[in-house]
Image (cartoon, rainbow, N blue to C red):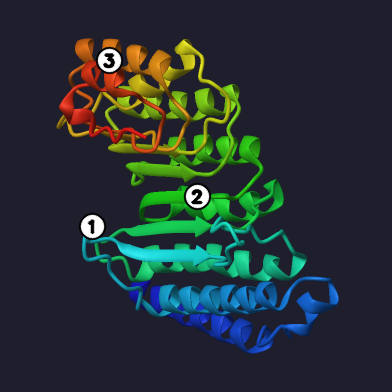
């Protein structure tokens, strides 16, 4: 029967995951020290591998923890190491990570097929280099799984990330919220992401939020800024969130934003914290934009 076949597939998936967890057990921390990394880096890598194994196990077993604020099930993969200034250090790509990325992709699909029960995942990957080879491993899972929110921070390879996001957003209409932090997108990268969001909205598969935090390194040209502002406004319930924190914006951008908001009231929430607006800029921007002046 179909139920028996599904059960057999689930057991097969669990067995392969358990076999993988056994075989993969323990990459010695000396591996990182031998490559010239610090003790702190080696510790953070051990924590990363342990965290990935826990996340994969939770996905396979259906024991992913819930987020109290959003009702989603949280899968967070992070390399947690800061420099003396408090900035997060990015883990470089390593071939030793490839089996973990493959198992994570398989586990995302497994959870979606056998454990979702009408729930959704929120998937975040922080401070780990994601070259195209890794994104290609992850993309089918992100295109097919029951994921509502994705967030990538400090992952490098901005062009490949933008192309990945474009394809995933086009394919997976479960995803309604997408965010990026500390990834320096070029103008064409931003346009690719925004175009994918606008295509979704035009097709009634609405996006609810876009976050671009510290992603716009150079001064934003007016056309690109308008495209970012306009990408997320066609939301049915008029509750779109656009987060543009930490993007070195100042008076010129404030004027563009103010003009856009006056003629596009559907952008209900706009976060502009930690930019470079002055008091005069604040008078231009509506209270609903939640501006913090720095």
Q: In the drawing, does residue 82 fall left or right of residue 65?
A: right
C-alpha gap between disc 1 and disc 3: 30 Å
Residue positioned 78% across, 84% down in the render:
30
The quarter in which the N terminus is drawn is: bottom left
- Residue 117 location, x and y as percent? 25, 66
Q: Picture coordinates of residue 110 (x, y %)? A: 45, 68
In the drawing, what numbered circle is on residue 70?
Answer: 1
Q: Helix or strand or loop: what does disc 1 sit on?
A: loop
Q: What residue is shown with label 2?
A: 152
Q: From the viewer's side, name the closer residue of 123 and 33.
A: 33
Spatial CA distance of label 2 from label 3 is 28 Å
Disc 3 crowd rating (10 Å Cα; few below 14, some 14-19, many 20+) is: some
Q: Camera-side residue: 292 or 96?
A: 292
Which numbered disc flags the more N-terminal residue, 2 or 3?
A: 2
Nearer to us in this view, 165 or 173: 165
Give me the C-alpha separation between circle 1 and circle 2. 18 Å
- Report whether residue 276 is seen: yes
143 left or right, relative to 177? right
The residue singled out by tag 3 in the image is: 258
């Amino acid at each position: 029967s179909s139920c028996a076949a599904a059960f057999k597939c689930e057991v097969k998936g669990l067995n392969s995951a358990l076999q993988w967890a056994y075989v993969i057990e323990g990459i010695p921390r000396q591996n990182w020290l031998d490559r010239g990394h610090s003790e702190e880096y080696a510790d953070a890598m051990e924590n990363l591998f342990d965290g990935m194994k826990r996340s994969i196990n939770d996905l396979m077993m259906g024991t992913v923890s819930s987020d109290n604020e959003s009702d989603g099930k949280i899968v967070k993969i992070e390399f947690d190491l800061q420099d003396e200034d408090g900035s997060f250090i990015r883990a470089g790509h390593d071939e030793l990570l490839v089996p973990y990325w493959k198992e994570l992709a398989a586990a995302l699909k497994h959870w979606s097929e056998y454990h979702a029960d009408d729930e959704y995942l929120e998937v975040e990957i922080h401070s780990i280099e994601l070259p195209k080879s890794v994104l290609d491993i992850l993309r089918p899972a992100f295109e097919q799984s029951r994921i509502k929110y994705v967030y990538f921070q400090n992952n490098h390879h901005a062009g490949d990330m933008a192309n990945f996001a474009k394809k995933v957003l086009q394919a997976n209409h479960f995803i309604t919220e997408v965010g990026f932090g500390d990834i320096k997108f070029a103008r064409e990268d931003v346009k690719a992401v925004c175009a994918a969001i606008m295509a979704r909205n035009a097709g009634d598969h609405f996006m609810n939020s876009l976050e671009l935090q510290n992603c716009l390194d150079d001064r934003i040209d007016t056309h690109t800024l308008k495209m970012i502002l306009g990408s997320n406004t066609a939301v049915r319930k008029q509750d779109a969130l656009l987060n543009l924190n930490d993007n070195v914006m100042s008076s010129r951008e404030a004027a563009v934003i103010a003009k856009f908001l006056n003629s596009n009231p559907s952008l209900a929430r706009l976060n502009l914290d930690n930019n470079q607006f002055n008091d005069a800029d604040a008078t231009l921007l509506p209270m609903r934009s939640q501006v913090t002046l720095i």
